[in-house]
Amino acid sequence: MEFNEHKPIYIQIAEAFCEKVLDGSFGADERIPSVREYGSEIGVNPNTVMRVYEKLTAEGIIYNKRGIGYFVSADAREKVLAVQRAEFLEKEVPAIKRRLSLLGLDPSVFL
């Protein structure tokens, strides 16, 4: 995994994880790799992965079964969609509108 130096690594990993939830790589109630396994897989310190798992647990995207491991929540896809849609509408759409205006393009070219 390649990282952007302008954004915390754990946030980038969490975003990549959420993309895997959206594309179906991680399904509802599916066991995900352990902290050490995932850290080794993507080439980061297990402490960084633990921070990611804590963030995703707090957001209700994954949950921990003590002694068994971490699992994707049954409603993880819906939660990720809601957060990413809101972020897209609040941050990216206004930037796209500004850019279209600056370039003299009509938004209808996308329809």
Image: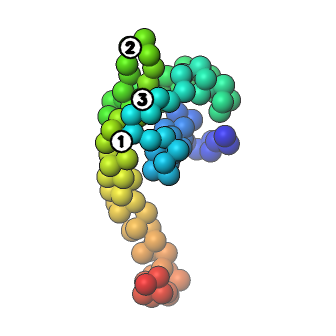
| Circle 2 residue | 66
Three-letter residue code for mark 3: Phe
Determine whether the residue tagged by mark 2 lies in a helix, strand or loop.
loop
* Residue for badge 1: 76
Q: Residues within 10 Å of mark 3 (few under 14, many from 20)?
A: many
Give the mark, 1 or 2, whose residue is nearer the N terminus. Answer: 2
In x, y percent, where is residue 78? 32, 49
The disc label shown at residue 71, or none: 3
Q: Is residue 56 above or below residue 102?
A: above
Please, is residue 60 above or below residue 110 in the view? above
Left or right relative to 4: residue 76: left
Q: Is residue 99 visible?
A: yes
User: Label 2: how many residues lie within 10 Å, few (<14), some (14-19) or many (20+)?
Assistant: few
* Mark 1 element type: helix
Q: Does residue 2 appear left or right of residue 69 in this picture?
A: right
Q: Of helix, strand and loop, which one carries label 3? A: strand
Q: How far across and how far down the image is residue 77, in percent?
A: 37, 47
Quadrant in the rendering for residue 1: top right
Whole-angstrom CA distance, mark 1 to mark 2, is 19 Å
- Of residues 6 and 88, the one nearer the viewer is 88
Residue drawn at x 32%, y 56% as measured from the top left: 86
Asked if residue 2 is positioned above or below residue 85 in the image, the reply reads above
Q: Quadrant of residue 59?
A: top left
What numbered label is drawn on residue 86?
none
Cα separation between marks 1 and 3? 10 Å
1 or 3: tag closer to the N-terminus: 3
